[in-house]
Image (cartoon, rainbow, N blue to C red):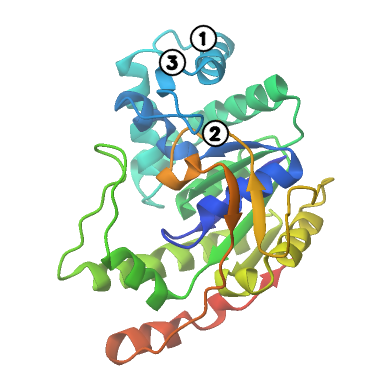
Amino acid sequence: MYIYIAGYARSGTTLTSAILSSMLDAVDLGETNNLWRALLLDGDCGCGRPLKQCPVWMGRLHDLGAKLSLEALGGVGGLHVLSMNATAFRRMASPASMRARSSYAEVVEALARIAISDSQAKAIVDESKTPGMLPVLARMRMASRVFHLVRDPVAVAASESRGYAGEPGMYAYVPSERSRLRSHLGWHVNNRGVQLIAERLSVPYQRMSWESVTRQPRESFVRICEWIGLPYSTVRWMDERVYDLPPAHNPAGNPNRMRVGPVTVKHQDVGRASGLEAVSRVAAGSLRRESHD
């Protein structure tokens, strides 16, 4: 099964991916759409090793190249093509996206099946977040689920405005005077895009707000696992809020994917907003209410 976590940056997707992967004994693929760029830029695996020195990922990419007869997959040329295809899906109606969708779906599905096979898991979790990857899921011959995590847009903008450091060339973000406005616009485009595309695809879809998840974390994650429909374990929950994260080979995404050990899922509530931010919160409307099929 392919479990896709959709949403926007700073919405709790990295932690959600890590906890769900552990509870379901699934493979955490991280942000699959950024895997190819991480390889090009010598990024690190979640295990702490450089990706190009991680035996797990070097084995998977070797098998992927053999399975699809992509001789250049291990070289800069092949990785550049895959990176560009993945980036194109962020623009939902771009010509590049339309042309590349079928071939890229074949690559992603093959990678998912290899990861499931070598780990003897029943599912993978992909936290790529972007709406443009949803049509790719529709072209894959795997059962899939779309879990849409939505955090209050004002809280997201406040978080992004503080900036953050990350891996060179990939995740570092320096705020500017326009960063809060850009964050609000990105929030609405991304989350509305996920909602509109998911409703048009025959893929099981559930949406929850990060604030509701963090109100009762253990109970919320149990509900998500039950909706997914796979066996799960709660043994790593140390109490209602603390989860003992195991090591994982998450190859690309927020640097927090490298966290191991007890992690507290803190309750995130919405604060006050005024002006354009208050308008943005009102416009978010139904997106912040739970929905599932």
The residue at which mark 1 appears reads as 69
Residue at x-position 63% and y-position 38%? 246
Alpha-carbon distance for marks 2 and 3? Answer: 26 Å
Residue 201 in sight from this viewpoint: no
N-terminal of the two: label 3 or label 1? 3
- Residue 105's disc is 2
Q: Position of residue 83 (x, y in %)?
A: 36, 32
The residue at which mark 3 appears reads as 53
**Amino acid type at image mark 2:** Ala
**Which structural element holds mark 1?**
loop
Q: Position of residue 250 (x, y in %)?
A: 52, 35
N-terminal of the two: label 2 or label 3? 3
> Marks 2 and 3: which is nearer the front?
3
Q: Position of residue 286 (x, y in %)?
A: 56, 81
**Amino acid type at image mark 3:** Gln
Say if mark 2 contacts mark 1, CB within 8 Å: no
**Which structural element holds mark 3?**
helix
Q: Quadrant of residue 118?
A: top right
Q: Is residue 244 above or below residue 264?
A: above
**Which structural element holds mark 2?**
helix
Say if mark 3 contacts mark 1, CB within 8 Å: no
Alpha-carbon distance for marks 2 and 1? Answer: 15 Å
**Amino acid type at image mark 1:** Ser
Looking at the rendering, in which quadrant would you find the N terminus? Answer: top right
Alpha-carbon distance for marks 3 and 1? Answer: 22 Å
Residue 185 vs residue 88, the one in the foreground:
185
Residue at x-position 62% and y-position 64%? 199
